[in-house]
Image (spheres, helix red, strand yellow):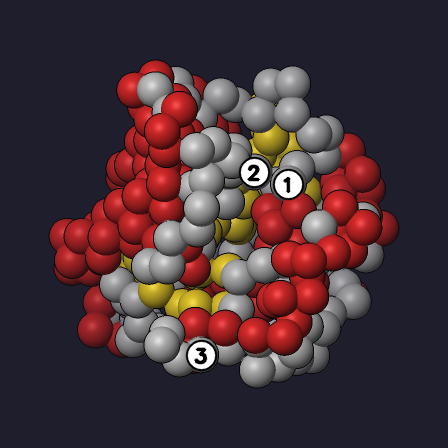
Amino acid sequence: MADHPSDRSPGRAPAPPGGSASDPPGNPASSRPADPALPRLTGSVALVTGAGGLIGGGVARRFAQAGAAVVLHHRPGGRPVAHLVEAITAMGGMALPVEADLTDERACHRLIEAAASWRGRLDALVHSAGIQPVQDLAGMTADDWRRMSEANVTSAFSCTQAAAGVMSDQGGGTITHIASIEGSRPARGHAHYSAAKAALIMFARAAALEYGPRGIRVNTVSPGLIHRDGIEDAWPDGVRRWTGAAPLARLGRPEDIGNACVFLASDAAAWISGHDLVVDGGVSARPTW
């Protein structure tokens, strides 16, 4: 029986007839190693921007482990994603690397077009690309402010608008933006970053409001401090203060953010939109006085 619009979970378009778009002959989804803790996204296509970064790479791996075919965006001159492509294909998944400068609106639209044309659909966009320089407010210039806004907010606007056009035509989809707990709690040296992430959270809510009737869910994930190699040596005081303040007493891992994004892209989150999911080990729950 054909899907009736009221039978579809918001944010997930029906699978194409005749099988899964991401399961080529000889590589069925059932043969792929999967993490049983993750919701299944078999047959879906996800685009992760900033996949060359720590969080973006972690998100992409978790989508692949959930069964999705993953488009890996990286910026020109940025970290290569060849190793990530190899890792995903080694586990039996599918990955496509695509380079794009997301400060260029036309490049954002071309990226979305490339992602959608790869397997004939685009079910999920996770926008993880961005920058995070440290700079005192007193020495900040208007150009510094604009650069932050273009990289972290305007790129999100362009990618969301382009992805929503594709998702509307196919009956729905999900969009998740990687924000930050600094969108609600500023940090020294991050006035422009905190403002940009606050704007991103509100933009996602506005997009959820306008795109919801088209079957598109839009949310944000706000990470806390994520572990990276060498952070204990580079910033021992910060790590000590964080682990002392976090009720769960550890730094986050890239897969923690990936898990949240996979959940939001799944049918398990079918009635969640316009939400900022904080993933910070409980730091935001601590008293402020």
Q: Amino acid at mark 1?
A: Gly
On the rendered image, what quadrant is the N terminus found in? bottom left
Residue depth check, mark 1 versus mark 3: number of the one nearer the observer: 3
Seen in the picture, residue 158 relative to 163 is either above or below; the reply is: above
Q: Amino acid at mark 3?
A: Arg
Q: Is residue 160 visible?
A: no
Whole-Å distance between the Cαs marked 2 and 1? 6 Å
Sequence-wise, the earlier of marks 2 and 3 is: 2
Seen in the picture, residue 213 relative to 6 is either above or below; the reply is: above
On the rendered image, what quadrant is the C terminus found in? bottom left
Sequence-wise, the earlier of marks 1 and 3 is: 1
Disc 2 and disc 1 in contact, CB within 8 angstroms:
yes
Q: Is residue 206 visible?
A: yes
Tell me the residue that label 3 is attached to: 286
Tell me the residue that label 1 is attached to: 53
Seen in the picture, residue 79 relative to 245 is either above or below; the reply is: above
Among the 4 quarters of the image, the one containing residue 275 = bottom left
Q: Is residue 248 left or right of residue 222?
A: right
Q: Is residue 55 left or right of residue 171?
A: right
The foreground one among 63 and 3 is: 63
The foreground one among 163 and 201 is: 201
Tell me the residue that label 2 is attached to: 50
Dot 1 alpha-carbon crowd within 10 angstroms: few under 14, some 14 to 19, many 20 or more: many
Q: Going 32% across and 23% down the picture, which residue do you hit?
A: 146
What is the x, y in percent for residue 64? 66, 56
Task: Provide the secondary structure element on which disc 2 rests.
Answer: loop
What is the x, y in percent for residue 224? 53, 61
Q: Going 37% across and 25% down the picture, which residue do you hit?
A: 140
Whole-Å distance between the Cαs marked 2 and 3? 30 Å
